[in-house]
Amino acid sequence: MAALLPKLFAGIQYLLPQHALSRLMYAAVRSRRPWLKNGMIRWVCKLYRVNLEDAANSAFDAYGCFNDFFTRALKPGSRPICGEPQGIACPADGAISQIGAIEGRMLFQAKGQRFGLSALLGGDEFQAAKFEHGSFVTVYLSPRDYHRIHLPVAGKLTGMTHVPGSLFSVNNATTENVPNLFARNERVICHFEGEAGPMAVILVGAIFVSSIETVWAGEVTPPRAKSVRHWDYSGQDIKFERGDEIGRFNMGSTVIVLFGPQRTTWHPEVGPGAAVKMGMALGQYR
């Protein structure tokens, strides 16, 4: 019976009105009614054992709404960025879902599940070719985690793509039972060029992830789009250093980082299931 529960959990999500539920969550987490937002903060802190010791503000009353709490800033210095000259910094707090090589144009999702690189990148074959036989890391953010995303390696922003899609959960039960999950869910793909060559940072939406935003464009979603949207920044000088904030999830999800072929060496102790903090070294680039 226990083995059937993950399949049942994943199956039910096909029937849910995923976007309607996310629109309701969008409104609820932005309510400024003290009884509602404080109640939600207390409930999440208790349920997920959220540690507020490293938050810039640890008092519930300091946050105007639940979303302000969920995307809370940290105390300066609480997430030191790795000091290795060519170190790859973890982009977010959370847990490593998968890390390793891109096998041709296929990425490992979970036991028995793989998904295509081109599909992940919204069908962009030009971009997919850059990462063929490259490497990737997938970081899962739980509700207890810090939800701002930071750049793993210094780079210049060259483009952004928003791919509309489903909003399945991205926990283990769903990644193991929903084929092509990360290529099905809504996502925002950020392309960079730097010393590590081409790099893509992909913010994957999920059920109740009612908004994804970047520091250069603000909220990318909502509103819900019906087709893939592209932004070209190649003519602009938008640069970020390693560890700079580039975006955030308004509710939690997953971030995937792609590198080109023969560009990375991952640290052997950083494997699937490993707890990680933003800024810690995941490996090195060359």
Image (spheres, rainbow, N blue to C red):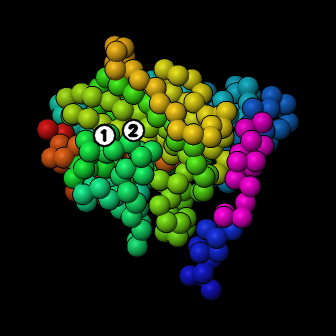
Residue 78 as seen in the image, left or right of residue 166:
left
Please name the amino acid that badge 2 sits on.
Val
Residue 126 disc label:
1
User: Could you say whether the residue bearing mark 1 is in a helix, strand or loop?
Assistant: helix
Residue 102 as seen in the image, left or right of residue 250:
left
Residue plotted at (40% across, 60% down): 115
- Quadrant assignment for the C terminus: top left
Residue 98 against residue 87 in the figure, above or below: below
**Residue 22: within the magenta?**
yes
The answer to whether the residue labelled 1 contacts the one labelled 2, judged by CB atoms less than 8 Å apart, is: no
Q: In terms of image quadrants, where is residue 213? A: top right
Residue 171 as seen in the image, left or right of residue 107:
right
Label 2 crowd bin: few (<14), some (14–19), many (20+), radius 10 Å? many
Residue plotted at (42% across, 51% down): 119
Residue plotted at (35% across, 38% down): 200
Residue range in magenta is 13-27
Give coordinates of residue 234: x percent, y percent: 34, 20
Q: In terms of image quadrants, where is residue 259? A: top left
Residue 277 appears in the figure: no
Residue 152 appears in the figure: yes
Please name the amino acid that badge 1 sits on.
Phe
Seen from the viewer's position, the closer of residues 42 and 203 is 203
Residue 201 disc label:
2
Seen from the viewer's position, the closer of residues 36 and 98 is 98
Q: Earlier in the sequence, mark 1 or mark 2?
A: 1
Give coordinates of residue 108: x percent, y percent: 35, 62
| Cα–Cα gap, marks 1 and 2 | 16 Å
Direction bottom: furthest residue: 1
Q: Main secondary structure of the magenta part?
A: helix
